[in-house]
Amino acid sequence: MSFGKRVVKWRHAIFLIALILLIPSVIGMKATRINYDMLSYLPGDMETVKGQDMLLDEFGKGGFSIIVVENMKTGEVADLKKKIENVESVDSVLNLEAVIDPTIPQSMWPEVVRDNFKNENASMLVVFFDTTTSAEPTINAVKEIRSITTENCYVSGMSALVTDLKDICETEEVKYVGIAVLLSLIAMMLLLDSYLVPFLFLASIGMAILYNLGSNVFLGEISYITKAIAAVLQLGVTMDYSIFLWHSFVEKTAQGKTREEAMAYAVDDTLAAVTGSSITTVAGFLALCFMSYTMGRDLGIVMAKGVVFGVIASVTILPAMILAFGRLLEKTSHRTLIPDAGKLAHGLTRRYAVYIILFVVLLVPAIYGYQHKNVVYDFTNMISSGAGKLDTSQTGFLTANNKLDEDFEIGTTHMIIADADLPSKDGRAMSKEIEEIPGVQNVLGIDALVPADIPKELLPEKVTEALVAGDHQLILVNSMYHVSTDECNEQIDKIAGVLAKYDRDAKLIGEGPATKDLITITDKDFKVVSFISMAAVFLIIFFVLRSAALPFILIAVIEFAIYMNLGIPGFTGLELPFIVPVCISTIQLGSTVDYAILMSTRYKSERLAGKEKREAVEIAAATSIPSIIVSAIGFIAATCGVGLYSNISIISTFCNLMARGALISMLTVILVLPSVFMAFDGLIVRSTLGMRKLNSKVEA
């Protein structure tokens, strides 16, 4: 008994099991932790990561925030400091009163010490947390601090960013799915020949999405980006499988078979047909696992699982649903809006040279734009550049960062973990050299805070406890430069050079140094992942089509579409969050090369059947174009709405580029691939297994 017949026979049991499995899936989904700290995905062997671990292990400090207090009296600031110190997960708080011992006349302290924490209109408090930047206790602490502070208090830093980011994501994620479902539903109702079947598609895919999200519990945690786009992306990528099953089922019933017989054949046909296309998609996602920046692995594993669940649902759950609603499906059938593609196919083969020339002409600006795309690494842009408008209550960290910049000219803060036994003379000399580096506002450490004529022992105990632990001391370096800028990265290099003179084992950590490391490894990751994804897809096409030439042709066509997609920002100036280009290049290749494989398979079969070159290409194009259009529009519908709605830049940009990539790939395959077949038919025939034995004349 074939697999399709077993599915039909046991369809009621399959549907019941599918419903039962939703229970553990929902439980697993809720139990999966969401990670909002994108720097936590840096490789563990990097010095910045080791330093961050040391900060937590030795100093008991994870995240930190700088609170700017405006127009508040000294006594009020002191009262606020006490309240913040009592917040759970707050390790310590430093301000002017904590640093300057009341028994020492302030006139004896360097003026820079007072300026570091207070000016005419504002005061600054440095708050250290005893848990990591994105840990739940840290987020709760930030929320509590905000609740006890006034409208004149502003909490800045990565922990504040993560807090706001989490709130926005939790508010918007359900809407993402709703938008994707609604637009996909409208598209499928218009493009398919039934008003009801799109609802069944979405119900089946929805169950597969829940299985995928629920199984993430075994990973322990996933990134907020993965959680936000996984459902939308899985919907867009796996819709094809449902469409193929439906078309096959309709075709078999039109041949006079009963619905049960037609479905058994449709399941077997679908399983055989989508295996090759799903493997290329899975390969594209799994290529992300080779990134040293491990968020790629996070997204790759989740989406590869999603494709597998999508295939399984399309050949088990969906057939059971279609058979259950058979009569109602017949009553809701209608004529599809997709016109016959015969005339278009005829025109493409007639003027194929025009499209080849167009391909070559557009390739030049595509490559130029691709090489000049504007990639950004500043995490503060992840929210502020979104599609919609957020009120200040949703972006408190942005307001706080701006206040910190305005009142104290601080763009970011670096941290140095140095030897606690470093001689005071060397410590002061090191601090002075660092302060002289362009862009450094001030240096806050034991030696920097204590004048040469005052012993360290006179520092308040709370300050010593906050800045010294075991064999190491903590030094804060406030910079006027913003993270990821060339100026900031150059400054970090110079600070590292100074540290090497006084303490070779010192570690420079913080958002700035970690982001600099991120820039270095993601550039390498992009090249590695692109190579692996192309190699994997090449091998899959090679074995599926048994051709030496077709893998090169198909990958070249889709890579052209990728270069076009990622090259447009090079002309528009759109900022691309660093993770977007590498993900787009691999996902667009893996998911849209299916369009090219579909047309190539039909072209090959027609040539093997004895058709001449032009006739084979026309038939392949005419029969494939409707399916390619439906598939691409389904993908576009699932992603474009989210891209237009989302207030989170990285999600908005990602979805917009995925939608545009699907559109460009669709147009490229429809317009360019038939022309390439016409131009290189001879090469394809000679390099494809079975086609070399063609008896028909091979046209040049």
Image (spheres, rainbow, N blue to C red):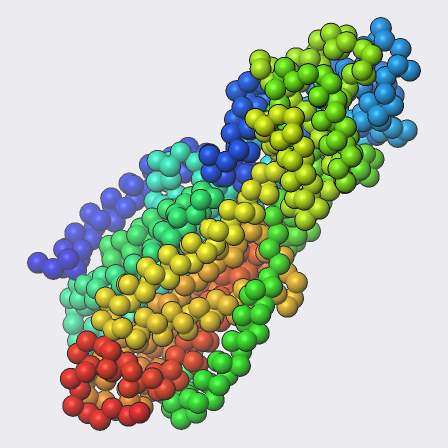
From this viewpoint, is residue 150 visible? no
Q: Is residue 522 above or below residue 512?
A: below
* Residue 20 falls left or right of residue 348: left
Q: Residue at x 59, y 28 (%)?
A: 504
Q: Quarter of the image for the N terminus: give it.
A: bottom left
Q: Residue at x 66, y 12 (%)?
A: 465
Q: Residue furthest left?
A: 1
In percent of width and height, residue 666 lies at: 44, 73
* Residue 670 falls left or right of residue 368: left
Q: Quadrant of residue 609?
A: bottom left
Q: Residue at x 26, y 68 (%)?
A: 542
Q: Total of numbered circles in the picture?
A: 0
Q: Residue furthest front?
A: 501
Q: Quadrant of residue 161?
A: top right
Q: Quadrant of residue 243?
A: bottom left
Q: Is residue 453 above or below residue 271?
A: above
* Residue 551 falls left or right of residue 396: left
In percent of width and height, residue 170 lies at: 55, 41
In percent of width and height, residue 45 lies at: 46, 34
